Amino acid sequence: MSDPLAPVIAALAQPGRPSSDYELNPDVALPPGRVLRPAAVLVAFEQHGDGLRLYLTKRASHLKHHPGQIAFPGGKVDPGDRGVVAAALREAHEEIGLPPDHVKVLGTLDTHETVTQFQVTPVIAQITTPFIPRSEPGEVEQVFTIPFGHVVDPAAFRIESRLWRGTRRKYYVVPYGPYYIWGATAGILRQLAQRMADETQRRMDHI
């Protein structure tokens, strides 16, 4: 039986490029000398009866950054973390109860810069041992999964816009049911989808 994550692993082995909340808004002037804070998120897939599922969270409404939004488990890199992978695993353990030893890290995507001045490293992983999700009440309102197939086609993403700090800002969205997946989360997922599409095209070109 073929590995359903093989296309992801193949895509991670190919060169990519960083993504940003600003890439659809090239006219935005970035602050000179801005300092980006390192952060990491866990893009974790698990095999279910109906195929691969991706874990996401709905953030608590009282949080300072991105309240109520759909996000990966993750957060800033703390001084005690041994790099971005360790930070992503720690945050996933804290936020959704995923033990680090239940996870196989497959690789990382290029960083994604957010409008809140974080430089986020997406850590791609496979959940190898079943676990019972547990929401961290101070940060996470809900833990849920969506089908892998929903986020691997670049054509599934669309561009929308809204006013932000007096200017109209464009961003990617890839909604699923009641979940409005947008902003940095959608941008990171689109980066992965594009890497996979590019790898598929590369293989076709060599046939």
Image (cartoon, rainbow, N blue to C red):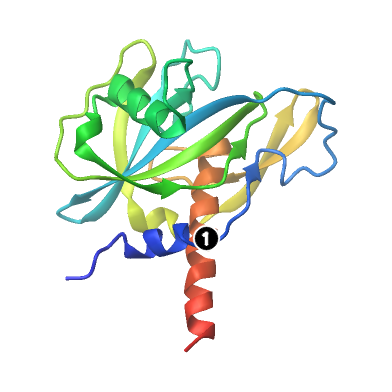
Residue shown at the point (41%, 45%) measured from the top left: 176
Query: What residue is pinned by disc 1?
Result: 195
In the picture shown, does residue 52 fall above or below 104? Answer: below
Q: Position of residue 135 (x, y in %)?
A: 27, 21
Q: Quadrant of the N terminus?
A: bottom left
Q: Nearer the viewer, residue 202 or 95?
A: 202
Residue 153 visible, this orientation: no
Q: Amino acid at mark 1?
A: Arg
Q: Secondary structure at mark 1?
A: helix
Q: Residues within 10 Å of mark 1 (few under 14, many from 20)?
A: many
Task: Name the side, left or right, on which 159 lies relative to 166.
Answer: left
Residue shown at the point (20%, 34%) measured from the top left: 101
Give residue 41's quadrant in the image.
top left
Residue 43 visible, this orientation: yes
Q: Position of residue 129 (x, y in %)?
A: 15, 41
Q: Nearer the viewer, residue 198 or 174?
A: 198
In the picture shown, does residue 77 fall above or below 131? Answer: above
Residue shown at the point (69%, 34%) measured from the top left: 162
Q: Position of residue 11 (x, y in %)?
A: 46, 62
Task: Name the side, left or right, on which 16 lies relative to 115.
Answer: left
Give residue 184's quadrant in the image.
top right
Q: Nearer the viewer, residue 119 or 64?
A: 119
